[in-house]
Amino acid sequence: MNFQQAIQSGFANYVNFRSRACRSAFWYWQLFLLVGGVVAELFDYGTGFHSAPFSLLFWLATVLPDLAIYVRRLHDTDRSGWWLLLFFVPLVGAIVLIVWFCTKGSQGYNRFGPDPLPAEVSLHGAGRSLHRGQTDTAD
Protein backbone atom coordinates (compact mmCIF):
# COMPACT_ATOMS: atom_id res chain seq x y z
CA MET A 1 0.00 0.00 0.00
CA ASN A 2 1.37 3.40 -0.91
CA PHE A 3 0.96 6.74 0.86
CA GLN A 4 -2.06 7.90 -1.15
CA GLN A 5 -3.87 4.56 -0.80
CA ALA A 6 -3.26 4.61 2.95
CA ILE A 7 -4.81 8.07 3.30
CA GLN A 8 -7.80 7.08 1.18
CA SER A 9 -8.19 3.88 3.19
CA GLY A 10 -7.95 5.78 6.47
CA PHE A 11 -10.79 8.12 5.55
CA ALA A 12 -12.84 5.43 3.78
CA ASN A 13 -12.70 3.27 6.92
CA TYR A 14 -13.02 6.12 9.41
CA VAL A 15 -15.42 4.22 11.67
CA ASN A 16 -14.45 0.67 10.74
CA PHE A 17 -13.41 -0.98 14.00
CA ARG A 18 -13.94 -4.55 12.77
CA SER A 19 -11.45 -5.44 10.03
CA ARG A 20 -7.65 -5.37 9.78
CA ALA A 21 -5.00 -2.86 8.66
CA CYS A 22 -1.53 -3.77 7.39
CA ARG A 23 1.64 -2.12 8.68
CA SER A 24 2.11 0.08 5.63
CA ALA A 25 -1.42 1.49 5.93
CA PHE A 26 -0.87 2.19 9.61
CA TRP A 27 2.55 3.84 9.30
CA TYR A 28 1.65 5.89 6.23
CA TRP A 29 -1.40 7.13 8.14
CA GLN A 30 0.85 8.13 11.04
CA LEU A 31 3.12 9.99 8.59
CA PHE A 32 0.06 11.77 7.17
CA LEU A 33 -0.97 12.84 10.70
CA LEU A 34 2.51 14.18 11.41
CA VAL A 35 2.80 16.12 8.15
CA GLY A 36 -0.82 17.33 8.28
CA GLY A 37 -0.43 18.45 11.89
CA VAL A 38 2.71 20.41 11.09
CA VAL A 39 1.05 22.06 8.08
CA ALA A 40 -2.00 22.97 10.19
CA GLU A 41 0.27 24.46 12.87
CA LEU A 42 2.11 26.49 10.22
CA PHE A 43 -1.20 27.84 8.91
CA ASP A 44 -2.21 28.79 12.46
CA TYR A 45 1.14 30.49 13.05
CA GLY A 46 1.12 32.22 9.66
CA THR A 47 -2.36 33.65 10.07
CA GLY A 48 -1.71 34.86 13.61
CA PHE A 49 -4.55 32.90 15.20
CA HIS A 50 -3.98 32.24 18.88
CA SER A 51 -6.78 29.68 19.16
CA ALA A 52 -5.28 27.32 16.49
CA PRO A 53 -8.43 26.76 14.37
CA PHE A 54 -6.63 24.85 11.58
CA SER A 55 -5.02 22.46 14.04
CA LEU A 56 -8.32 21.93 15.82
CA LEU A 57 -10.14 21.22 12.55
CA PHE A 58 -7.41 18.81 11.43
CA TRP A 59 -7.54 17.01 14.79
CA LEU A 60 -11.35 16.78 14.70
CA ALA A 61 -11.26 15.42 11.14
CA THR A 62 -8.71 12.72 11.96
CA VAL A 63 -9.40 11.60 15.54
CA LEU A 64 -11.94 8.87 14.62
CA PRO A 65 -9.99 7.51 11.63
CA ASP A 66 -6.87 7.45 13.80
CA LEU A 67 -8.57 5.50 16.56
CA ALA A 68 -10.06 3.11 14.01
CA ILE A 69 -6.71 2.38 12.35
CA TYR A 70 -5.13 1.71 15.76
CA VAL A 71 -7.82 -0.88 16.45
CA ARG A 72 -7.58 -2.41 12.96
CA ARG A 73 -3.78 -2.66 13.31
CA LEU A 74 -4.19 -4.54 16.59
CA HIS A 75 -6.71 -6.81 14.85
CA ASP A 76 -4.10 -7.60 12.18
CA THR A 77 -1.85 -8.96 14.94
CA ASP A 78 -4.85 -11.00 16.21
CA ARG A 79 -5.34 -8.84 19.31
CA SER A 80 -8.49 -7.17 20.51
CA GLY A 81 -8.84 -3.42 20.12
CA TRP A 82 -9.26 -3.19 23.87
CA TRP A 83 -5.46 -3.59 24.15
CA LEU A 84 -5.33 0.04 23.03
CA LEU A 85 -6.07 0.95 26.65
CA LEU A 86 -2.42 0.11 27.36
CA PHE A 87 -1.69 3.70 26.31
CA PHE A 88 -2.87 4.67 29.79
CA VAL A 89 -0.06 2.65 31.41
CA PRO A 90 2.84 5.10 31.62
CA LEU A 91 5.81 4.35 29.32
CA VAL A 92 5.49 0.53 29.33
CA GLY A 93 2.07 0.53 27.68
CA ALA A 94 3.17 2.77 24.83
CA ILE A 95 6.33 0.70 24.26
CA VAL A 96 4.35 -2.54 24.11
CA LEU A 97 1.85 -1.06 21.67
CA ILE A 98 4.56 0.34 19.40
CA VAL A 99 6.21 -3.09 19.27
CA TRP A 100 2.86 -4.66 18.37
CA PHE A 101 2.25 -2.00 15.69
CA CYS A 102 5.64 -2.87 14.17
CA THR A 103 5.00 -6.62 14.28
CA LYS A 104 3.97 -8.42 11.11
CA GLY A 105 0.28 -9.29 11.08
CA SER A 106 -1.03 -12.83 11.18
CA GLN A 107 -1.09 -14.43 7.75
CA GLY A 108 -4.34 -15.53 6.21
CA TYR A 109 -7.68 -15.30 7.88
CA ASN A 110 -7.94 -14.59 11.62
CA ARG A 111 -10.92 -13.91 13.88
CA PHE A 112 -11.07 -10.29 12.64
CA GLY A 113 -11.20 -11.07 8.93
CA PRO A 114 -9.05 -11.81 5.91
CA ASP A 115 -5.43 -10.79 5.53
CA PRO A 116 -5.24 -7.15 4.31
CA LEU A 117 -2.13 -7.94 2.22
CA PRO A 118 -2.59 -9.43 -1.26
CA ALA A 119 -2.25 -13.17 -1.56
CA GLU A 120 0.51 -14.75 -3.60
CA VAL A 121 -0.42 -15.80 -7.11
CA SER A 122 1.10 -19.03 -8.38
CA LEU A 123 2.74 -19.21 -11.80
CA HIS A 124 1.32 -22.37 -13.32
CA GLY A 125 3.99 -25.00 -12.82
CA ALA A 126 6.89 -22.55 -12.81
CA GLY A 127 7.78 -23.25 -9.19
CA ARG A 128 7.67 -19.53 -8.33
CA SER A 129 5.05 -17.25 -6.90
CA LEU A 130 4.36 -13.58 -7.40
CA HIS A 131 2.48 -10.99 -5.41
CA ARG A 132 -0.33 -9.26 -7.25
CA GLY A 133 0.97 -6.40 -9.35
CA GLN A 134 4.38 -7.98 -9.98
CA THR A 135 5.40 -9.31 -13.36
CA ASP A 136 7.53 -12.30 -14.18
CA THR A 137 10.73 -10.79 -15.57
CA ALA A 138 13.00 -13.72 -14.73
CA ASP A 139 14.05 -16.23 -17.44
Image (tube, rainbow, N blue to C red):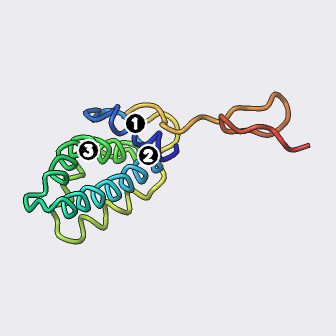
Crowdedness near tag 3: few (<14), some (14–19) or many (≥20) residues, C-alpha within 10 Å? some
| Residue type, mark 3 in image | Gly
**Residue at disc 2, secondary structure:** helix
Can you identify the residue that label 1 sits on?
Answer: 9
Q: Are marks 2 and 3 in contact (CB under 8 Å)?
A: no
Q: Position of residue 101 (x, y in %)?
A: 38, 56
**Which is nearer the N-term, disc 2 or disc 1?**
1
Q: Residue furthest left?
A: 51
Drawn side of residue 67 relative to residue 48, left or right: right
- Label drawn at residue 81: 3
**Which is nearer the N-term, disc 2 or disc 3?**
2
| Residue type, mark 1 in image | Ser
- Label drawn at residue 25: 2
| Residue type, mark 2 in image | Ala
Position of 133 relative to 138 (above/below):
above
Q: Residue furthest bottom?
A: 91
**Distance in Å between CA atoms under marks 2 and 3:** 17 Å
